[in-house]
């Protein structure tokens, strides 16, 4: 299924972070350059690495063995294979960073000093009680266990790892599934357990509050956990919110409260389907404003999209299989340092499954310099002009861009021949 989406308001920025960006023509020229290398050589000066490095990288790891729910027996979260998820996590952080072992990959993502705190923002939007036994989609325990394993592999003690979803309950079921007993939990109302804490929010006159662009002057008050933490890992789910996407930016909707508006009143300031109160949501958008608060923007080291299960149609119902994955579950994890770029890729999967979804939030965030927004050319080839997206299928290991990077490195180190590199590039081009 090939789909090309045209923006209602093309707003893909010309300059991002002051760097040169790449047009579709550049991409074709570049692909041509690879073909030229194949025919003419020499490969030693291949521009591949430099070209890729200009764009934010997004990785996805797909492994159909991650889940095996039959949609009849029990709950979907009883059918997740922790070992498979652990491997997906390790492959993902290594591919994102180019490091060859797990601890080095995590170290390069999080510049951790002894005593610092890492907070993980999960999505428990459907967790409204302390029981947690329901089939509706929430962050999967296995995804968080794999993150915690990665952090402890680089020496972070468990009690310096905090898990939070300030506006929801962290259920007993969720806490019981976390394998490390020293983790702390922060949410609106504590359930049970010695490591639970109730969240607090900063005051409107605090320097940690920030100001919305629209409604102009409205104070955004982050939860105290983000003020006290040193590093932030954002873990959104692969799901739609009905008519619009709810990914990395929306995942922080529950991280803050407002001075004068309630949470539900503020929906009008990011959702085109409702009255936007005069805001041009492509430029002024409360989700972009929230993510522009320094405690979120400056502390986010990594975004991991939990797509082990997903739902392209709604945020509040059960998990759902995907036609684009052969009527199987999505079985995906996404990785990026850029919350806008990873949301762009996750949004393209959702739109490939079900059609257009409003996402002015991503355009506004890109225009505010919070990251890079783009759309792929088609579901089949998944090429972006502005994003370095590398999909990795563990069950169907085609040659990917990282293999080319690796073989060129080997060539430079003298451990691969030019013929081998050309073969790798040929196989890559055949697989596109
Ligand atoms: Zn767009």
Image (cartoon, rainbow, N blue to C red):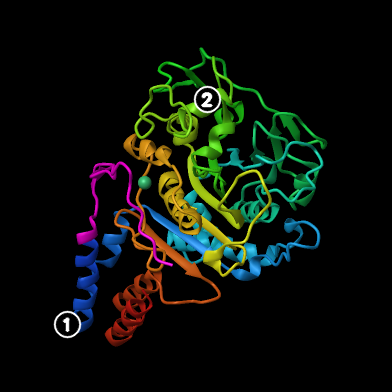
Give 259 or 118, whichever is nearer the viewer: 259
Residue 372: tell me if it is visible: no
Instruction: Farthest residue to the left: give it.
Output: 40
Magenta segment range?
1-25
- Residue 326: which quarter of the image? bottom right
Mark linked to residue 347: none
Q: Which residue is mark 1?
A: 40
Q: Which quadrant would the N terminus be assigned to in this image? A: bottom left
In the visual, does 397 lie left or right of 328? Answer: left
Whether residue 19 is visible here, answered yes or no, is yes
Question: In the image, is residue 304 part of the stretch drawn in magenta?
Answer: no
Is label 1 in a helix, a strand or a loop? Answer: helix
> Mark 2 near ligand 1 (CB under 8 Å)?
no
Q: Foreground: 44 or 91?
A: 91
Q: Are marks 2 and 1 in contact (CB under 8 Å)?
A: no
Q: Residue 173: where, in percent of width, then height?
A: 79, 47
Closer to the camera: disc 2 or disc 1? 2
The label number, if any, that marks residue 266 in the structure image: 2
Residue at 40% x, 72% y is: 400
């Amino acid at each position: 299924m090939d789909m090309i989406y045209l923006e209602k308001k093309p707003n893909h920025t010309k300059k991002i972070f002051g760097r040169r960006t790449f047009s579709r023509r550049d991409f074709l020229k570049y692909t041509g350059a690879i073909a030229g290398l194949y025919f003419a050589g020499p490969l030693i000066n291949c521009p591949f690495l430099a070209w890729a490095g200009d764009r934010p990288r997004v990785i996805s790891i797909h492994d159909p063995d991650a889940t095996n729910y039959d949609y009849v027996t029990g709950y979907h979260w009883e059918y997740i294979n922790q070992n498979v998820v652990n491997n997906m996590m390790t492959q993902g952080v290594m591919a994102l960073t180019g490091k060859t072992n797990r601890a080095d990959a995590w170290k390069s993502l999080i510049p951790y000093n002894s005593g610092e705190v890492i907070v993980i923002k999960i999505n428990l939007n459907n967790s409204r009680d302390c029981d947690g036994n329901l089939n509706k989609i929430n962050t999967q325990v296995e995804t968080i266990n794999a993150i915690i394993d990665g952090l402890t592999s680089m020496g972070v003690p468990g009690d310096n790892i905090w898990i939070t979803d300030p506006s929801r309950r962290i259920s007993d079921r969720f806490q019981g599934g976390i394998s490390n007993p020293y983790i702390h939990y922060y949410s609106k109302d504590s359930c049970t357990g010695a490591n639970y804490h109730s969240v607090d929010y900063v005051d409107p006159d605090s320097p940690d509050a920030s100001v919305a662009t629209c409604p102009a002057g409205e104070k955004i008050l982050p939860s105290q956990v983000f003020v006290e933490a040193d590093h932030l890992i954002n873990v959104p789910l692969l799901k739609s919110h009905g008519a619009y996407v709810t990914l990395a930016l929306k995942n922080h909707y529950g991280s803050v409260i407002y001075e004068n508006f309630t949470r539900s009143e503020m929906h009008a300031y990011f959702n085109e389907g409702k009255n936007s109160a005069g805001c041009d949501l492509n430029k002024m958008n409360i989700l972009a404003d929230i993510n522009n608060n320094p405690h979120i923007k400056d502390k986010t080291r990594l975004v991991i999209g939990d797509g082990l299960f997903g739902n392209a149609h709604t945020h509040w119902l059960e998990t759902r299989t995907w036609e684009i994955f052969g009527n199987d579950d999505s079985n995906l994890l996404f990785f990026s340092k850029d919350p806008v770029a990873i949301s762009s890729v996750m949004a393209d999967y959702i739109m490939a499954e079900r059609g257009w979804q409003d996402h002015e939030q991503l355009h506004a965030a890109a225009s505010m310099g919070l990251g890079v927004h783009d759309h792929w050319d088609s579901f089949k080839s998944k090429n972006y002009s502005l994003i370095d997206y590398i999909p990795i299928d563990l069950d169907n290991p085609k040659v990917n861009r990282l293999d080319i990077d690796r073989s060129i490195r080997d060539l430079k180190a003298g451990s691969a021949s030019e013929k081998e590199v050309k073969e790798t590039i040929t196989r890559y081009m055949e697989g596109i």
